[in-house]
Amino acid sequence: MSAALSGAAAAPAQRDLVIDVRNLTRTYQLGAQEVHALRGVSMAIERGEFVAIMGASGSGKSTLMNLIGCLDQTSGGTYLLEGVDIAALDEQTLAKIRSRRIGFVFQSFNLLPRTTAAENVALPLFYSGQLADGAHRVQQTLSLLGLGERLDNRPNQLSGGQQQRVALARALINQPAILLADEPTGNLDSTTANEIMGTLRDLNREQGLTVILVTHEQEMADFADRIITLRDGLVLSDIRKEAPAAASRPVRLQPAALPGASGLSVSELLSFLTMAFVAAFSAIGRNKLRSALTMLGIFIGVCALIIMLAVGEGARAAVQAQLKSLGTDLLIVLPGSSRGGGVRGGSGSASSLKVADGAAILEEDPAVAVISYVNRQSAQLENGDENWSTSVQGVTPSYLTIRNWGLSAGRLISEADEREGRTVCILGQTVVDNLFGEGQDPIGATVIVKNVPMEVIGVLAVKGHSASGQDQDDVALIPFRTSQVRVLGVAQPSTAMTQGGTVYPAPPNPFNIQAKLQGFVQTMYIQARSAAEVKTALQQVTQTLERRHRIKPEQSDDFSVRDLTEIAEVADENSRVMELLLAAIASISLLVGGIGIMNILLVSVTERTREIGIRMAIGARRFHVLLQFLIEATLLSLIGGGAGVLAGIVASKVIAHVAGWPTLLHTTVIIGAFCFSAGIGMFFGFYPARKASLLNPIDALRYE
């Protein structure tokens, strides 16, 4: 047959052209030098043809193959694929064309090394979303090529010819319209090469598959029906050996029905996610030590975060419990300051509160439910040879009810004890531990309080230390009337008035006798009818005391009323700030772990550049590559975060048991820490994933 340049005449309208190349050019910029790989190539290939493209190294045949396969971009000219101008298509549509319309067979096989033959062949199905009956199609395709018994073998367990058949099966699995084979026999012996070429010819003859073969061997080119020879980027000759065999006509790719314009379908997304998770677990498993070290940063960060939040939340709950034990509906009234000689004493230096004030409050203020008076002094308690200095408090019978303080043994102070001024007392656990031996029952025993024998009628329930560190169990309670008449004797100001700066000397007191101030109290505990009426009760109590003490509007009150709900709010806010501070410190470890993930993924992208190119060549979009590396980063974080959550829970329990610190973990904290670790992986994994997705397919395939 005579030679004819395919660009010599325009293609007739009735010809079914699958590839139409017109004046195609490709120029590469290497520094300051321009390399013209193609210099105006024109050709037309009909559906069902078997075409061989020959030429010496550097002739441009591989560049032309990459342009036809939509792996590279042209510098000039026009390329029509089944009537569609490729230059007008976006990356997403080009990826779908590579996935469904074009199959690639490479000289170096380009199989994923750590996956089986079946998994390599099935890979394009995940990107095209055609997983229905996928396993059967994979087995059928491999069996067609004589590899039905090699489904589970990895590439290193196959010969060169078998690996090329796997690559060929992968190219055919999506039933493409065009098969591009770039030096498919270059690494094979002559017998195996002839077998591969025979297979390609059979596919062309029997299935009407359009085959384009790139080779530099004349013997391989002879299998084709048409041989196009290139030299220095130009078509040297185009020889048709014989008329193409009749072939079935595959569905034509129409511009109006281009895939990808509507984005990923649900089936494509689900199939890809299935593959991506399997690939991510496989990548993590291949580098176990590196993956474990990468997860370690996330593990330590999440573990520290859980421990810090558990300790912080436990401390906050303990403070709230202590404040709640005082009563959320409680008001505390304290005496104000005294003034003498122009000098003002501190808070509590005046004896301004009286029992009569309490009676008036209870009678006149409807928001007040119960009131209790308290006088306190430090005194020495004795029991036989044992003695202990503690705070002795004279209280009314309602005191323990208002304070929400129960007994571990014995009975409460009764109204009869108060009315008759009986010499009875209730001891705190610390006092009991210091006055009574182990196993000795204090109930019914007699202790000496300031030389007054008193019967122990009860033991207070343990309260522990307050938020300020004071031992709340180091106390002895006696009836209020008894404290005034027989034991304490006076209601002393809680803060002594300092004499200074006065010209009037204090009256002589050679025996240091304290003034008797009957009917005065040091502290009032007032319980509102409900927590909602605390503010109302505070206002009513303040007005009642101002009226009884004849305090004018311009004068300062000689008392102070404290609302424990405000104290609770301040304490809660302080605890919250401390908890957030601890969480922020622990989060630094998470950030360090995230940087480790980013570093490892950057290394992984470099190591797997060729794999990325292979995936793009068989139909992966940039979004697929981005999502795959993001999934891998997220899995690293989730595994490390999950282990960190478990370790943090165990560690917080150990700390609570060994150190005695209160710890508290909410489900929301655990879920939040787990999700935060996933967010860290996604955030720090985005840059490496995006870098991988922006790789040029042809550059990635050439990467060594």
Image (cartoon, rainbow, N blue to C red):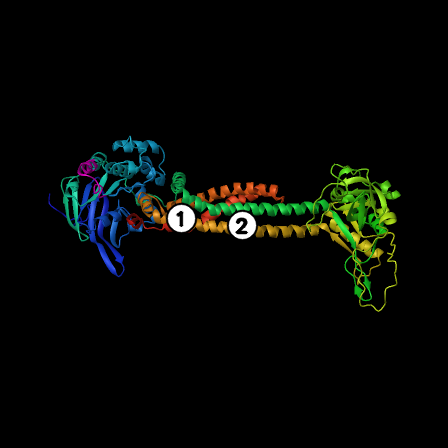
**Left or right of 324, for residue 504:** right
Numbered circle sitting on residue 601: 1
* 147 w.r.t. 636: above or below: above
Sequence order check, earlier mark of 2 and 1:
2
- In the image, residue 335 lies at what x, y percent? 80, 55
Q: Which mark is residue 586?
A: 2
- The reply to whether the magenta stretch includes residue 191 is yes
Q: Residue furthest left?
A: 2
- Give 434 or 235, whichever is nearer the viewer: 434
| Magenta segment | 182-198
Could you tell me if residue 241 is visible in this image?
yes
**Residue at left 84%, top 48%?**
450
Q: Is residue 382 left or right of residue 208?
A: right
Q: Nearer the viewer, residue 304 or 82?
A: 304
As helix, strand or loop, the secondary structure at mark 2 comes to helix
Left or right: residue 407 compared with residue 254: right
Q: Dot 2, crowdedness within 10 Å: few (<14), some or many (≥20)?
A: many
Q: Amino acid at mark 1?
A: Leu
Residue closest to the eye, 25 or 338: 338
Viewer-nearest of discs 2 and 1: 2
Image location of residue 286, percent across then percent down: 38, 41
SS for tag 1? helix
Q: CA distance from mark 2 to mark 1?
A: 24 Å
Question: How far across and how far down the image is residue 268, in percent?
Answer: 38, 40
Q: Is residue 269 left or right of residue 334?
A: left
